[in-house]
Image (cartoon, rainbow, N blue to C red):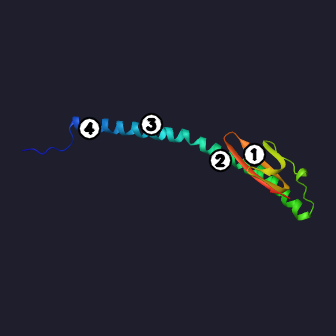
């Protein structure tokens, strides 16, 4: 009796078909993951830009506090932000004026309140 020393043609074809199906599923899954990964990166960049605008306002506010010459009306509102000086907040009225700042970029919003 002779020993068989290899694979049959059917075994090789079945192996190739299984690998082709696995590769197709792998590419279909990771293809979507790689093309969709740019969306969160863009959201992070826009959020960082909003935070930078708010940091600019905070720096102006702190300089005014340190110098003792804080004037909320003198704080310049960055582009893309809405600045309102008021003495009311939702639900109650404050004794002093404060600056409400809302910076928006599409779906993302950063809000802050600066007081005198």
- Tell me where residue 5 appears, x and y as whole percent: 18, 44
Residue at the image point whose x is 87% and y is 60% from the top: 63
Q: Kindly report the distance in space between the C-alpha atoms of the residues bearing marks 3 and 1.
A: 39 Å
Q: Nearer the viewer, mark 3 or mark 1?
A: 1
Disc nearer the start of the sequence (3/4): 4
- Which residue occupies the extreme right position in the image? 69
Asked which quadrant contains residue 10, the reply is top left
Task: Kindly identify which residue carries mark 2.
Answer: 44
Q: Kindly report the distance in space between the C-alpha atoms of the residues bearing marks 2 and 4.
A: 48 Å
Task: Kindly identify which residue carries mark 3.
Answer: 28
Q: Kindly report the distance in space between the C-alpha atoms of the residues bearing marks 3 and 4.
A: 24 Å
Decide if residue 47 is on the left or right side of residue 79: left
- Nearest the viewer among 59 and 25 is 59
- Nearest the viewer among 70 and 49 is 70
Quadrant in which the N terminus appears: top left
Decide if residue 73 is on the left or right side of residue 94: right
- Nearest the viewer among 63 and 8 is 63
Label 3 crowd bin: few (<14), some (14–19), many (20+), radius 10 Å:
few
Q: Are marks 2 and 1 in contact (CB under 8 Å)?
A: no
Decide if residue 71 is on the left or right side of residue 24: right
Task: Kindly identify which residue carries mark 1.
Answer: 103
Disc nearer the start of the sequence (3/1): 3
- Tell me where residue 58 appears, x and y as whole percent: 80, 56
Label 1 crowd bin: few (<14), some (14–19), many (20+), radius 10 Å:
many
Q: Kindly report the distance in space between the C-alpha atoms of the residues bearing marks 1 and 4.
A: 62 Å
- Tell me where residue 46 appears, x and y as whole percent: 69, 44
Task: Kindly identify which residue carries mark 4.
Answer: 12
- Tell me where residue 30 appears, x and y as whole percent: 47, 41
Label 2 crowd bin: few (<14), some (14–19), many (20+), radius 10 Å:
few
């Amino acid at each position: 009796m002779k020993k068989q020393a290899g694979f049959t043609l059917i075994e090789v074809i079945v192996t190739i078909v299984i690998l082709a199906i696995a590769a197709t599923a792998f590419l279909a899954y990771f293809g979507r993951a790689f093309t969709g990964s740019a969306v969160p990166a863009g959201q992070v960049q826009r959020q960082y830009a909003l935070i930078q605008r708010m940091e600019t306002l905070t720096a102006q506010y702190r300089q005014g506090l340190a110098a003792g010459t804080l004037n909320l009306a003198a704080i310049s509102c960055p582009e893309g932000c809405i600045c309102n000086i008021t003495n009311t907040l939702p639900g109650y009225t404050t004794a002093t004026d404060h600056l409400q700042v809302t910076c928006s970029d599409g779906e993302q919003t950063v809000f802050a309140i600066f007081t005198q």
